[in-house]
Image (cartoon, helix red, strand yellow):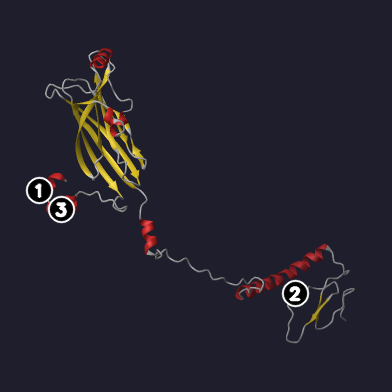
Amino acid sequence: METTSVGTKRHPGRVCDPRGQHHSHVGASDTPDPRCSPPPVPGHPRLGLLAQQQHLAAVSPCLMQQEERLRGEVSETPPRRSAELRVPMKFVPSAAPSVPMATPPGNMAAASSPSVFMVAVNGQIESGQFPGFDDLYCKFCFVYGQDWVPAAGLEEGISQITSRSDVAPTTFVWNFPIEITFKSTNPAGWPQIVVSVYGPDFFGNDVVRGYGAVHIPFTPGRHKRTIAMFVPESTSKLQKFTSWFTGRRPEFTDPKVVARGEGREVTRVRSQGFVTISFNVVTKDMKKLGYDVSPSDMQNPSLVPATERIHKY
């Protein structure tokens, strides 16, 4: 005679647990896993701690197999993206290569044409010839029109004191450098350099020994200029003697007046000495603005003999 536990009924073809909860029927083809069916535990339906541990130990291998099988199915089947996560693709046009766009001839000419031209000058005040004087020095400054603006360099300067030598008693060598760059829109008021030479008199006072001015050469290249110097004269012999005795010779308050023509017709002057200056001139964008300053022999080099071109340039 088959005995059953209290509160637990055995039914053929049905799997049940010790708490009396029935599982699904097991068909003829479905063979239940004996490890998944817990063994009958005698006693009350409410199992003790030891019985629960034994039940979990018996069921855990089956649960692990089911979990591994589900993981295999998930890994083999690619996940499907839900309709909510699907984002419509947007077409982003790629950046076109930077190709210069064709511009009308008028706009192209306006864009390429400069607004100013530049004149760069460097060189030196080489020497001066002043017979009968000693220990001379010179000053220089530039005078230019309203449309001219200095872009770099020095507008004024003063040289060292030079004494005469026994080889050339009348020549004073300074070799004082000058360097400046101008920019302008109009050639009117082309820059001039003003040179003033000073030296001591009989009483040791510094008095003017000569004024002179010359335009910066218009053509690019190397140039040399000799300036004829002059000094103001007193209007009478009495003033001349007084100025010699007091050491206050006639001179211009502003040396830049030498480069201007205002009031020169009422000024009495006397020639005295020479100053030699060398220039190196470089121009930029003058031809683009319509000013052709190149010398005629450079425009037609075939008209000049080859030996002369080599000597000059």
User: Where is residue 81 drawn, in percent x and y?
Assistant: 63, 73
Residue at (28% x, 32% y) in the render: 194
Point out the frontmost of discs 1 and 2.
1
Residue at (39% x, 61% y) in the render: 107
SS of the residue at dot 2? loop
For residue 99, which quarter of the picture? bottom left
SS of the residue at dot 1? helix
Of callouts 1 and 3, which one flags the residue occurring earlier in the amino acid sequence?
3
Q: Which mark is residue 301?
A: 3
For residue 230, which quarter of the picture? top left
Query: Quadrant location of the N terminus?
Result: bottom right
Q: Which mark is residue 307?
A: 1
Q: Amino acid type of disc 3?
A: Pro
| Contact check, label 1 and label 2, Cβ < 8 Å | no
Instruction: Report whether 71 appears left or right of 188.
Output: right
Residue 233's place in the image compared with 309, above or below, is: above
Point out the frontmost of discs 1 and 3.
3
Of callouts 1 and 2, which one flags the residue occurring earlier in the amino acid sequence?
2
Q: Amino acid type of disc 2?
A: Cys
Judged from this view, the residue extending furthest toward the bottom is 28
Q: Amino acid type of disc 1?
A: Thr
Of residue 73 and residue 200, the one placed in the foreground of this image is 200
User: Where is residue 66 drawn, in percent x and y?
Assistant: 69, 73
**Which residue, given by chain and number where applicable, does mark 2 sit on?**
36
Instruction: Report whether 45 appears left or right of 96.
Output: right
User: Where is residue 148 drawn, in percent x and y?
Assistant: 35, 41
Binning the other alpha carbons within 10 Å of mark 2 as few (below 14), some (14 to 19) or many (20 upward) gives some
SS of the residue at dot 3? helix
Residue 254's place in the image compared with 113, above or below, is: above
Instruction: Report whether 113 appears left or right of 269.
Output: right
As measured in the structure, the alpha-carbon distance from the residue carrying label 2 to the one carrying label 3 is 114 Å
As measured in the structure, the alpha-carbon distance from the residue carrying label 1 to the one carrying label 2 is 119 Å
